C-alpha cells in the first residue's frame, strides 16, 4: 500500500478511496489497522478513504455484519458491498452477489447499518455483460426508499451496455433521482470483460459503462483506476493522467473534450466529500499539476513525465518508487514474533530513522504491530535500497514555459483493494501460520 501511495503522490494524486476486502475476520483484523497506519503516515499528502468490500450475501450474518459496520465506523470508513457483480451476476443461481431470494432484505440491512452510523455507501455493481444484472437499479431504489440521496457511489455498472432501451431509461432515471455517482473503471474493465480465459478469442466489447448516456441524463460520472498491477489488472502506475488518457480513447471522450476532465477532478472529489480537492479557485490551496502540453492533443499524446506537482504552490520533491522495493524479502529477513528487527550496519544508515513502536496513533486494535510494525521493518529495507539507488527522475526538467494547468484526483474503487493482505503475504510469506502472526 505504501508503494502504491508513493506512486500516486508523485504523479499528482491528492485523494484515494480504496476498497479493502473484508470477507473473513482475519482480513478485517489485518486490513483496517494497516490502513489506519498508512492513513496517518500520509496525512497531509494523500487523503485516504477506506471502504469495506464484501459480497451481498455476507450481510445474511447479522452479527458479522454489525461487527463489520462498527469497525468501519470506528475507522471513519465507508460501507460497501458487491451486488450482481459475479461472472453470472443477475442470474438467480448467483447466490453470492445477486441473492435473488432475499436481496431486498440484505440491501435494507446495509442501508440500515449505514444510517445508524452515519456512513456513506460505495458499491461494486454489475461488473459483467449480463442483461439480467440490474444491481444499479436495485440500489437506486433502496437509496430513495431510505432517503440516502447523494451518499451512494456505484462503480463498474458494465451491464448497462446490455440493457434494453426501456430498461436503461428506468435505471438511469432512478439513478438520477437517487443522486448516485457512477464510477467507470475503463482500464480494468476493458481488460476483464469479454475475456477468453484461453486467450484464443478477441474481445467484442470494451467493458466501459455508458458514460455519455449517464452524464446526459444528469448523473454524476467519474473515472478511476481501480486495480493496479494485481490479479485483476496487470498494468498501471496509479497515474490519473494515464487513466483519463485511456478513458478518452476507449469511451470517445473527445469531439469535444469539453469538461470531461472533471470526471477525474471535482466529480470524484464531491463524491468523497472533499470540497477543496479537484478545483482551482480563489482562496483554495494551490494544489495543482502543471503540464507542458498546450492543449488536449499534446497533453494526451505523451505520458508527461516532466510534469510539476505543486502542493500549496510549491513543487514537491517526490519521485515514483523503484520497483525493487517490491522484491521479496529473503527468508532470513522475514519478520517473526521472536526474531530481531533487521538492523543496518554503520555503512548503510537509513535515510530516515525507523519509527518506534510507540509512535503514531496506535490503538488496542494495533496490537499486531505493537512489537515492531511490519511497515517499520519494510521501511528499513527500503531505506537501505534508497541509499544505494539513485533515480533518474531527479533529472526531471522543471521548466515553466508553455505550461497548462490541470488537476487530477483519484477516486479508486479497488485501487489497493487487497494490498494490505498482499503486503503481509508477500513480505512475510504465504503460509497460514505466517499470516496468523500478522493478523492475530
Image: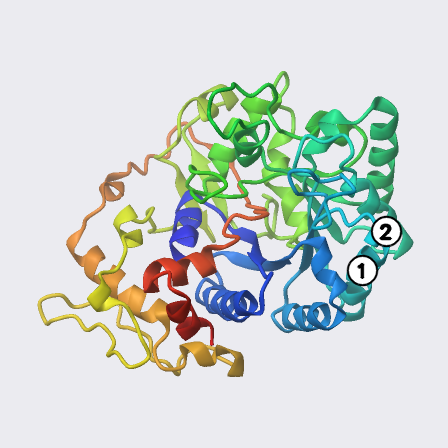
Q: Which residue is mark 1?
A: 111
Label count reads 2
Quadrant of the image occupied by residue 430 = bottom left
In the picture, the disc for residue 199 is none
Residue 129 horizontal/vertical position (percent): 68, 30
Q: Which residue is mark 2?
A: 142
Q: Could you say which is closer to the camera, residue 297 or residue 240? A: 240
Query: CA separation, marks 2 and 1?
Result: 8 Å
Q: Could you say which is closer to the camera, residue 286 or residue 407? A: 407
Q: Quick check: 18 above or below 168? A: below
- Badge 1 element: helix
Instruction: State the residue at coordinates (84%, 35%).
Output: 171
Residue 13 horizontal/vertical position (percent): 49, 47
179 with respect to 194 (left or right): right
Instruction: State the residue at coordinates (65%, 25%).
Output: 258
Query: Can residue 285 be seen in the rendering of this structure?
Result: no
Q: Could you say which is closer to the camera, residue 411 or residue 83? A: 83
Q: Are marks 2 and 1 in contact (CB under 8 Å)?
A: yes
103 with respect to 316 (left or right): right
398 with respect to 293 (left or right): left
Instruction: State the residue at coordinates (33%, 75%).
Output: 355
Q: Quick check: 133 above or below 148? A: above
Query: Can residue 211 be seen in the rendering of this structure?
Result: yes
Residue 329 horizontal/vertical position (percent): 25, 60
The outermost residue toward the left is: 347
Residue 110 horizontal/vertical position (percent): 77, 60
* N-term-proximal mark, 2 vs 1: 1
Residue neighbourhood size for the residue with mark 1, other residues' Cα within 10 Å, grouped as few (<14), some (14–19), many (≥20): many
Instruction: State the residue at coordinates (56%, 47%).
Output: 412
Q: Quadrant of the N terminus?
A: bottom left
Amino acid at each position: 500500500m505504501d508503494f502504491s501511495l508513493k506512486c500516486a503522490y508523485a504523479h499528482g494524486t491528492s485523494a484515494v478511496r480504496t476498497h479493502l476486502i473484508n470477507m473473513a475476520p482475519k482480513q478485517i483484523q489485518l486490513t483496517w489497522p494497516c490502513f489506519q497506519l498508512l492513513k496517518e503516515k500520509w496525512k497531509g499528502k494523500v487523503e485516504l478513504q477506506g471502504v469495506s468490500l464484501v459480497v451481498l450475501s455476507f450481510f445474511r450474518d447479522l452479527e458479522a455484519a454489525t461487527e463489520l459496520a462498527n469497525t468501519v465506523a470506528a475507522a471513519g470508513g465507508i460501507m460497501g458491498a458487491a451486488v450482481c457483480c459475479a461472472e453470472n451476476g443477475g442470474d438467480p443461481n448467483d447466490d453470492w452477489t445477486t441473492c435473488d431470494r432475499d436481496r431486498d432484505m440484505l440491501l435494507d440491512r446495509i442501508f440500515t447499518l449505514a444510517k445508524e452510523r452515519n456512513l456513506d455507501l460505495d458499491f461494486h455493481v454489475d461488473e459483467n455483460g449480463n442483461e439480467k444484472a440490474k444491481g444499479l437499479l436495485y440500489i437506486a431504489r433502496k437509496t430513495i426508499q431510505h432517503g440516502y440521496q447523494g451518499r451512494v457511489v456505484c462503480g463498474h455498472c458494465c451491464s448497462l451496455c446490455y440493457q434494453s432501451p426501456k430498461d436503461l431509461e428506468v435505471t438511469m432515471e432512478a439513478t438520477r433521482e437517487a443522486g448516485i455517482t457512477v464510477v467507470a473503471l475503463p482500464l480494468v474493465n476493458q481488460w476483464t470483460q469479454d475475456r477468453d480465459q484461453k486467450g484464443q478469442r478477441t474481445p467484442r466489447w470494451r467493458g466501459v459503462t455508458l458514460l455519455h448516456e449517464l452524464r446526459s441524463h444528469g448523473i454524476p460520472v467519474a473515472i478511476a483506476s481501480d486495480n493496479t498491477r494485481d490479479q485483476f489488472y496487470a498494468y498501471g502506475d496509479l497515474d490519473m493522467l494515464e487513466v483519463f488518457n485511456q478513458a478518452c480513447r476507449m469511451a470517445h471522450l473527445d469531439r469535444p473534450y469539453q469538461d470531461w476532465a472533471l470526471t477525474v477532478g471535482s466529480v470524484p472529489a464531491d463524491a468523497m466529500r472533499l470540497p477543496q480537492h479537484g478545483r482551482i479557485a480563489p482562496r483554495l490551496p494551490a494544489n495543482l499539476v502543471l503540464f507542458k502540453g498546450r492543449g488536449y492533443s499534446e497533453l494526451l499524446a505523451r505520458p508527461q513525465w516532466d510534469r510539476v506537482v505543486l502542493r500549496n504552490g510549491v513543487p514537491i520533491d517526490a519521485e515514483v518508487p523503484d520497483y525493487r522495493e517490491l522484491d521479496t524479502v529473503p527468508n532470513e529477513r522475514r519478520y517473526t514474533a521472536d526474531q530481531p528487527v533487521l538492523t543496518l550496519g554503520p555503512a548503510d544508515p537509513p535515510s530516515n530513522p525507523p519509527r518506534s513502536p510507540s509512535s503514531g496513533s496506535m490503538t488496542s486494535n494495533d496490537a499486531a504491530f505493537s512489537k515492531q510494525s511490519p511497515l517499520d521493518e519494510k521501511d528499513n529495507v527500503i531505506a537501505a535500497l534508497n541509499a544505494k539507488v539513485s533515480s533518474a527522475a531527479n533529472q526531471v526538467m522543471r521548466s515553466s514555459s508553455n505550461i497548462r494547468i490541470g488537476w487530477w484526483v483519484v477516486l479508486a474503487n479497488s485501487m489497493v483493494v487487497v494490498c494490505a493482505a498482499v503486503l503481509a503475504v508477500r513480505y512475510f510469506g504465504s503460509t497460514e501460520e505466517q499470516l496468523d502472526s500478522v493478523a492475530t
